[in-house]
Amino acid sequence: MCDGCGRCCLHKLEDEDTGLLYPTNVACALLDRKNGMCIDYAHRKKRVTDCVVLDRNSLGGLDWLPESCAYRLRSEGKPLRAWHYLISGSRETVHEAGQSTRGWTVSELDVDELEDHVVDRGL
């Protein structure tokens, strides 16, 4: 059911004092930033030990998931967005709607300081 937006694979910074999360434009090295999908989904936990597996039990505590995330929407009993491929019939509509990582992110392999990459975008 994954949207293919790739936004859950972006690094976030947490303020230790307030707990507030700040999104960055820095993507996991395994994210194909063009199509919004993991390039090694089956083995990602071995390669990225802190990668989160989305399942029914973990969804409730993942407040950093994008508000438009299909997993989050469905767990909250809300409908999928019109651009979701199960509604639109196309994996491109998430990108066309500007909801994906395509065109505005960088790989973590090309970044020194995450603090330099905080963006003014919703989680």
Image (tube, rainbow, N blue to C red):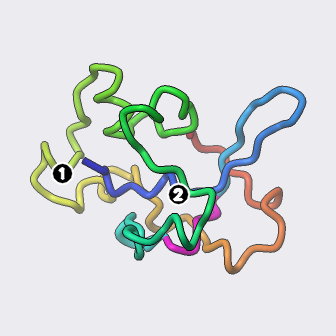
- Residue interval drawn in magenta: 25-30
Check whether the beta carbons of the residues at disc 1 and disc 2 lie within 8 A of each other. no
Can you tell which mark lies on residue 9?
A: 2
Asked whether, in this view, residue 35 is left or right of residue 8, the answer is left
Q: Residues within 10 Å of mark 2 (few under 14, many from 20)?
A: many
| Residue 53 at x, y percent in the picture | 46, 50
Reply above or below: 59 against 93.
above
Marks 1/2: CA distance?
A: 19 Å
- Asked whether residue 29 is drawn in magenta, I would say yes
Camera-nearest label, 1 or 2 = 2
Tally of numbered tags: 2
Above or below — where is 48 with respect to 90? below
Q: Residue 34: which numbered mark, if any?
A: none
Question: Relative to 2, is 92 above or below?
Answer: below
**Magenta highlight on residue 12:** no
Task: Give, as a three-letter code, the residue at label 1.
Answer: Tyr
Residue sitting at x 39%, y 52%: 98
The residue under the point 30% across, 53% down is 94
Q: Is residue 15 above or below residue 33?
A: above
Residue 96, image x, y percentages: 30, 57
Viewer-side residue, 102 vs 40 = 40
Helix, strand or loop under label 2: helix
Within 10 Å of disc 1 (Cα), the crowding (few <14, some 14-19, many 20+) is: some
Label placed on residue 85? 1
The percent coordinates of residue 4 (x first, y second) are 33, 57
Q: Residue furthest right?
A: 17
Residue 33, percent from left and from top: 46, 70
